[in-house]
Amino acid sequence: MTTVVPPRSTGKNRITEQQRVAHEGLVADLRERVPGRPMPGHFYTDPSVFDADLDLIFGRQWFFATTEAEVAEAGDYVTIDVGTRSIIVIRSDDEVVRAFHNVCRHRGARVLTEPAGFVGNLVCSYHSWTYGTDGALRHAPNLPEGEDPACLGLRKVSIRVIAGLVFLCLAAEPPADIDDFAERLTPYLAPHNLAGAKVASQVDIIESGNWKLVMENNRECYHCDGHPELSASFFPTYGLATQDVPASLRAAHDQFLLAEADLAVRCDELGLPKEVQEDLVEPNVAYRFGREALDGAGESFSLSGRVLVTKSLADLGETRLGRLTIHSQPNIWVHVMSDHAVVFTALPLSPDRTLVRTTWLVNADAVEGTHYQLDDLTYVWTETNTQDSVFVARTHAGVTDPAYLPGPYTAAEYQVDNFLSWYVDRMLEGCGESTGQGEGASEATA
Ligand code: FES
Ligand SMILES: [Fe+2]
């Protein structure tokens, strides 16, 4: 039986009658989605669906923007583009990380035009209106008498920093369950001191596919045969419950279970939480995180499984900690090992283009050439990203073909199914509709 859940987006986020009518066709299409299968092709290719994704997902939900390490010092900033929006994330002079719309309060020019940098004040280059790092208007030449500068500061964007990860929300009334996510995640992530880390490398690639295909691709290891470098340390039975492991992978799974038991003992001794926590459909801030074993030496994403950075991210007294894996919808996945972290984010550019940003974080005192070699540090995920971008491009081309019909997900792809159930429900809620995809969502049985 399908339980109808009343819409949660009420109050300030309520939609207008005009918006409701505009989304009528979309609502009908969303209701036709078959759980256990991908979306119909136009959900990945249609510009009107893409616009709705920007409006109802990236315009309503919390999404990942940047790491605290990228705005380490007061005055450091990054600009994040989402559709036609640009947002400034900056560490203010009082050390608080804040976010503002990158839109001048005079005539609307972009205030900052670089993707990242350092400023003393934020100066609009058009007519020199000058804002402090707290967003307040400090100076506007010849401002008419009677205009109050206090009412002309940069417009704020809701921001939440969780143990070094910076999330934003563009909604008038951001989903409150970010509190629950923060409370659950912080004990896992905070011991690694990401907030005090530094960026060793950041690489942007533009994948030729819809943002949902990028997210779907990273939610399963059914395709891990296509990642020979990653497979040296990543167990290929990821996402599979023991009873679903095929005969060809049983030996690898037995090895995984042994490594997991071993890791559990070490985590207990160190007081580090390990257990996987997962709620991928119901919450607005849907998540999966936990500590999972790596193959080989069990330390890091290297071909041997050994650490790639000889100075640990934090002094935890142990390097064999596998990976703390974190995924949150709509757009982030992370691996944190004892020696470094890799943070991935997907930002939609157009129906068929997605920016995938990969950031490698290391201890702020780690020295390139002494504690790590950059090419070695980035090797496995550079190769893996390249392979994944090919998979995404091929899939996007295929779902654009009129011959495409959504096929069945396998057991290893339950997280992909859950992601789409979450997507459909959040889209329906954004349209002011009742939801119900979560009822049919598949679950991990491990
Ligand atoms: S638009 Fe920014 S100062 Fe005029
Ligand atoms: Fe992959």
Image (tube, rainbow, N blue to C red):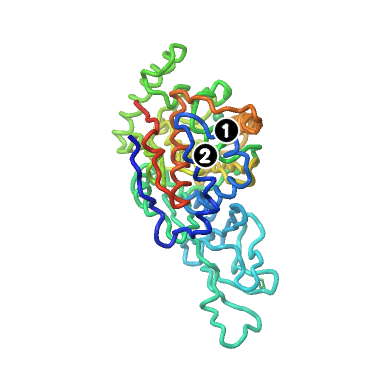
Observer-nearest of 259 and 287: 287
**Residue placed under numbered mark 2 in the picture:** 342
- Left or right: residue 121 versus residue 291 is right
Q: SS at mark 1?
A: helix
- Left or right: residue 151 versus residue 429 is right
Question: Residue at point 63% right, 37% down?
Answer: 209
Label 2 Cα crowd, 10 Å radius (few <14 / some 14-19 / many 20+): many
The percent position of residue 234, horizontal first and vertical second, equals: 48, 26
Outermost residue toward the bottom in this view: 145
The percent position of residue 326, horizontal first and vertical second, equals: 44, 39
**Residue placed under numbered mark 1 in the picture:** 381
Q: Are marks 2 and 1 in contact (CB under 8 Å)?
A: yes
- Left or right: residue 267 versus residue 97 is left
Observer-nearest of 52 and 333: 52
Question: Residue at point 46% right, 23% down?
Answer: 410
Disc 1 marks which amino acid?
Answer: Trp
Outermost residue toward the top in this view: 247
The percent position of residue 320, horizontal first and vertical second, equals: 41, 30
- Left or right: residue 3 versus residue 319 is left
Disc 2 marks which amino acid?
Answer: Val
Question: Quadrant location of residue 109?
Answer: bottom right
- Residue 244 at least partly seen: yes
Q: What distance separates the C-alpha of mark 2 from that of mark 1?
A: 8 Å
Observer-nearest of 237 and 187: 237
Question: Residue at point 61% right, 52% down?
Answer: 83
Q: Is residue 272 above or below residue 153?
A: above
Taking the image in four quarters, ligand 2 sits in the one at top right
The percent position of residue 246, horizontal first and vertical second, equals: 44, 14
Q: SS at mark 2?
A: strand
Question: Residue at point 55% right, 20% down?
Answer: 225
N-terminal of the pair, mark 2 or mark 1, is: 2
